[in-house]
Amino acid sequence: MPRILDAVSLTENARTRVGSDLAERARRVLPGGATHAARAYDPPIYVGRASGSRKWLVDGTELIDYTMGHGALILGHAHPVVVEAIREQAARGTHYGAASPLEVEWAELIASMLPSAEKVRFTQSGTEAAMLALRVARAATGRDRVVKLQEHFHGWSDVVSSYLDADGHVRTPPGVPSLLGTLTTVVPTGDASALIAELERRDVAAVILEASGAHYGRIPLAPAFISAARDACTATGTVLVFDEVVTGFRVGPGGMQALLGITPDMSILGKVMSGGLPGGAVAGRADLLELLATSIEHPGTFNANPLSAAAGIATLRIVADGVPQRTADAYASSLDREWTGALSTAGIGGGVRRLSSILHVRLDDPGAHARLANAMRAEGVDPLHTSAFCSAVHTIADLEQSSAAFARAIVRASSPA
Ligand SMILES: Cc1ncc(COP(=O)(O)O)c(C=O)c1O
């Protein structure tokens, strides 16, 4: 069997076979042939290499990448400074079973950038950060109930899985006890009176929300709502948690909280924070985080592991001045203009929404979303569903190529096969 990275040197027939062989092997050992619902493409694709704004499939196909590590790679793939930091650290050891200077510098960098971060506790993912923040809030308040907003995503743990069905009833997904629906109350997005009514019962430990609006800005949330949530939390002794797993360090060095001028009690972080390696963190008020030193259990083999810390520090040092984020924003703004123009030229109902360096394409026919993502891939551009994460290293050539690709893909997607 050829090594995957050698595939590009094979004949075209052999290269095509490498991809389909992998799909066949994957179906035998991976549920549904995939490891993440967002990567279960049909047809499946396998990436062998990525650099800057581009990635290459095992069959040699080149794609302009807008998945950017599910938003983690604001500096693009394999940024040389980040790669060097990882390489150096790997040679020095990947786990000391003890504290390392890296965790101190990593936490200091976060605290210097994020308004809510007096203290930082590292986790292994954004999902774990949400679990931990809610545990801290429950311990601090002595209350059990938490409140989340409909459609807001905070990872896959039981505690944030509840949702409202079409009739407005709280439901839990398969595998999550329905009893948990009584502990996690879901409020319709943007409904300030419903939120305030819940908080006035004074039995809610925490409100957790994406300050960008659900799905990193796909469904916007009015700043006035967030401000009302801040006031109501303060008035009722409820802990306000911002989910900045995607937005932290991406929309600017200080995240959404700096843009809005609203400081939560705790923030959860991930993605950009660990420079493309696994990681997460809860950052927030010292009095809340200090409970981790006294009453709250939080072990975790890979908390603040040196490899993620090295990648995180290298990345945060580069993004601390806000220049890479502004570069990525400017690129996204041009792409927004081009893609919006293509929709209107083709006379297709829908629009493009931009939050900083993230674009969301919304079509009036929701059935066309999956067709659009597939058509874009066929045109050499890989979005995450119909969203696009831009980086500081996308180029004018990427812009021209992906605008032309979008114009062709949108026409194809709007007419069902
Ligand atoms: C807003 C938000 N919160 C939390 C998470 C969970 O983070 P992780 O995938 O690192 O567990 C995600 C993941 O995409 C996310 O988008």
Image (cartoon, grey):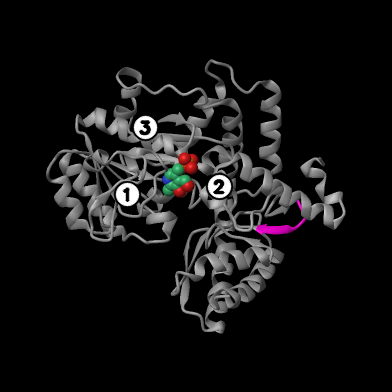
Disc 2: residue Cβ within 8 A of ligand 1's nearest atom: no
Residue 403 x, y percent position in the rendering? 63, 71
Crowd rating for badge 3 (residues with CA inside 10 Å; few <14, some 14–19, many 20+)? many
Q: CA distance from mark 1 to mark 3?
A: 22 Å
In which quadrant of the rendered view does residue 155 lie?
top left
Residue 254 x, y percent position in the rendering? 44, 46
Crowd rating for badge 2 (residues with CA inside 10 Å; few <14, some 14–19, many 20+)? few
Label 2 sits on residue: 32
Left or right of 391, for residue 47:
right
Q: Are marks 1 and 2 in contact (CB under 8 Å)?
A: no
Q: From this viewpoint, which residue is outermost toward the left?
A: 201
The amino acid beneath tag 3 is: Leu
Magenta region, residue range: 58-64
In which quadrant of the rendered view does residue 180 lie?
top left
Label 1 sits on residue: 262
Indicate the secondary structure of the residue bearing disc 3: helix
